[in-house]
Every structure is written in C-alpha cells, then in structure tokens.
Image: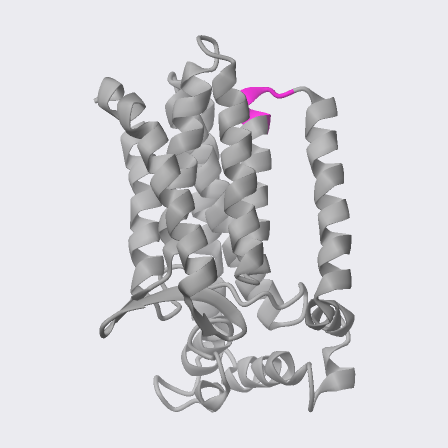
Amino acid sequence: YRDFAISIQRIVMGLSVALLYFTAFFGTTVNSSKNWLRIGGFSFQPSELVKVAFVFSAGITIYLLNKNKIRRFEFLAYAVLCMGALALMLDFGAVAIFFVGLMVILTLRGEHPLILGGIFGCAIVGVVGILWLYPYVARRFSVWLHAWEYANSTGYQQTRTMMSFASGGLLGVGGGNGYLNQIPAAETDLVYGIVGEEWGAIVAITAAFCLVAVGLYGCRLVKNSTCIFDAVTVGGSMAMILFQSALNIFGSVDMLPLTGVTLIFISVGGTSLISAWMMFAFFKAAE
C-alpha cells in the first residue's frame, strides 16, 4: 500500500492542479466565486476534492523528506499553485483553509520558525494585495463586527442569521418552519443559523461541540501516531475541517468575516460530503 501511495503522489498532485486551473478558467460562477464545474446535469466543486489530494500529498512528501529534499520544494510549489488557482476563482475562504492546513502540516514536520514566519509574512502581503485588487472583499472586511450598522446592505445576511438564531430559542421552531431559509445562501453559508432557528440552541451548540470533539480526537491520534504519514494526514485534515467549520459558524454571526464556505455534514453539497468522509478516512487509517 505504501509503495503504491508513493508512486501515485505526483500524479495526484498534477491532476489536482490541472483540475483547479481548468475550473478557474472554465468553471461556473456561484455566489461570486467560479468554483463549480458543470458536466451535463451534474455539477461538483473540485476544490473540495483537492483538499483530500493536498493532505495526501503532504503526508507522502514528509514521509519521504529525509530521503529526498527536493520533495519539500515540490510540495510548497504545489501548495502555492493550489492557492493561486483558488484565488483566481475568487474563493478566498478556500485559500485561507488551504493556508491553515499548510501551516499546521509544516509545524508537525518541525519546520524552522524562520521559514514559518516567512511564509506567514508572505501571506500577510497577499491579503493586503487581495484587499487592494478586489474591493468587494475589502467591503466584507469593513462589515466585520459592524453588521448591524449595515443591516439592510452588506450586513443583511449576518443580521438575519442572528435574528433567526435568537428566535429559535432553546428548542427551535421546528424543521422547515423557519424564516432564514428564504435568505440567499441560507443552505450553505448561513446553515448554522438554520440549525439554531429550526432545531434550537441546544442542538446547534451540540453540533459545534461535536466538531470540537473531532479536533480533540485528532490531536490524540497525532500525539500517539507512530507513523509521520498518519500524523500529517490527520493533523492536516483536522486543521482544515475545524478552520472551515469555524469560518462558517462564526462568519454567519459576524464574529469572523463571512467567507462563503460550507459547514461539513450540514450544508447542502454532495462534493463537500464526499470530501469530509474521505478526510475522515485518514483518521480511521491512523487508528
């Protein structure tokens, strides 16, 4: 199994980068991001599947690093190409998720703090450049923590999510009886608000704690792992899952900028569901 995984790593990297750039140029725009591919009546989001390829490639790279130093630069180039394609799609939430995954993976590998600091510094410069090139992203940041001041414009989604969540109380108004499902992107970006409104704060908070439990279990697996491949794949998957969930939950209630990412296992989207289960397969393998 290990030899086979090593043999297909570069193929996986090449195909995933090609798929991302094909989507960046020929994909379908949904909610201002060109991150969907439509083939006939079937549509899917390639960036969700590439998350799995990214974590897999990182695990193989670090497993082989002591034997071949070139692999480190291959993976860093691969990471930059992936994030560059996502930036072309204007899917900056996904860029942030990949970046956090990269930083956690490099930290697990024991990368030198100066290198980590340099990468983080480059990311800061990139964020400034994005805000300058794409004013609508800057407007989203300007709304952050000030949604009520823009309740009928750029803060419309967040304020309606907070009102709906509050109206649900502890037990909710019942499935399908809520108001928030009439708001654009409610079933994806704002889905945590639907959970709170229709099923109540008890269920919503329990769902969030389930994700925290996944993180704690992932930390335990990483700590007890005897194989660097397992440690890296579990750590990378855990970081991307938790950060994506945090962006969705806290973004919908104006505690973080609203980035338009999904909440795994809850938001609408078959590709997201497949990706989540594939990433959890790394957890199962590490057991």
Task: Tell me which residue sits at (74%, 31%) in the image.
Answer: 117
Report if residue 246 is visible in the image: no
Q: Quadrant of the N terminus?
A: top left
Task: State the extent of the magenta-drawn residues as a range.
Answer: 107-111
Residue 109 falls within the magenta-colored stretch: yes
To which quarter of the image does residue 252 belong?
bottom right
Q: Quadrant of the C terminus?
A: top left
Residue 171 falls within the magenta-colored stretch: no
State the predominant SS element of the stretch in magenta: helix
Seen in the picture, residue 89 relative to 230 is either above or below; the reply is below
Between 199 and 18, which is closer to the camera in this rendering? Answer: 18
Relative to residue 68, is residue 52 drawn left or right? Answer: left
Report if residue 244 is visible in the image: yes
Task: Tell me which residue sits at (49%, 36%) in the image.
Answer: 78
To which quarter of the image does residue 187 belong?
bottom left
Task: Tell me which residue sits at (34%, 29%) in the image.
Answer: 9
Residue 142 at what x, y percent from top left?
78, 71
To which quarter of the image does residue 39 belong?
bottom left
Residue 206 at what x, y percent from top left?
45, 61
Q: How many marks?
A: 0
Relative to residue 174, is residue 243 drawn left or right? Answer: right
Residue 42 at what x, y percent from top left?
24, 70
Residue 231 at what x, y percent from top left?
43, 26
Seen in the picture, residue 32 relative to 97 is either above or below; the reply is below
Task: Tell me which residue sits at (50%, 64%) in the image.
Answer: 205
Relative to residue 2, is residue 82 drawn left or right? Answer: right
